[in-house]
Image (tube, rainbow, N blue to C red):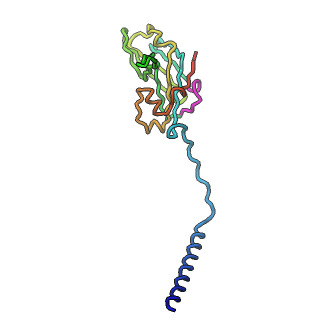
Amino acid sequence: MKTNQKSKIMNKFYTIIGAMLIVFTVACEGPQGPPGFDGNDGFDGADGIQGQVVEVEGVNFGYDDVDNIFSTLINFSDVTDFEVFEADAVLVYRWTGTVGLQDGSDADLWSQIPQNYFLPEGTIQYVFEHTFVDTEIFIEGNFDLSTLSTDFTDDQIFRIVFVPSVFANASKMDTSNIENVMSALGIEENQVQKLELN
């Protein structure tokens, strides 16, 4: 009889505890709060981050005899609809020709700017400045540049690489090689946008 009475007491105890748990969990649920703030949109592409490469052909430089400098201005809105932000990195590469590979095919040679060339007359250097709306490329030298060969000033080809700031800050990619940069950004050769300025 004592075991039966003990069993009844334990059943009442479990019933009371169960009822209290139900009341407690129901009491913890209230009305839904206000919605949180929307997050920032992510980038498309590998690991949610994507840049862009634009190839610009037919670039001609103008000579300024006062400053003895060549320059050309490329507006980003003329070559792409990619949105460039102030904190993004902009890299510029100049096409210097092609080289034959062992398999018989050719590969383009790209030289990262700034780039020096040592000529019989002296030294020239391609340099550039950029904002988030354009880039200006210059040819500076230590001799009278009015005599500079048009091989350096006319019908030039450049590749402009836009690297989102999130990626530029986190990456340790080798920017001296454009193929390394494109690989790090997940951009294939067939995704390079090409534009003829002439």
The magenta stretch spans which residues?
76-84
Of 54 and 65, which appears nearest the observer?
54
Q: Residue at x 36, y 14 (%)?
A: 118
Of 198 and 12, which appears nearest the observer?
12
x, y percent for residue 75: 56, 24
- In the displayed image of the protein, which residue is found farthest to the right? 31
x, y percent for residue 91: 47, 27
21, above or below 185, in the image: below
Residue 138 appears in the rendering: no
116, above or below 27, in the image: above
| Quadrant position of residue 107 | top left
Q: Residue at x 50, y 37 (%)?
A: 46
x, y percent for residue 198: 58, 15
Let me know if residue 80 is in the magenta part.
yes
- In the displayed image of the protein, which residue is found farthest to the top? 147
x, y percent for residue 35: 61, 54
2, above or below 144, in the image: below
Of 65 and 170, which appears nearest the observer?
170
Q: Is residue 165 left or right of residue 23?
A: left
Let me know if residue 104 is in the magenta part.
no
| Quadrant position of residue 142 | top left
Residue 100 appears in the rendering: yes
- Number of numbered tags placed on the structure image: 0
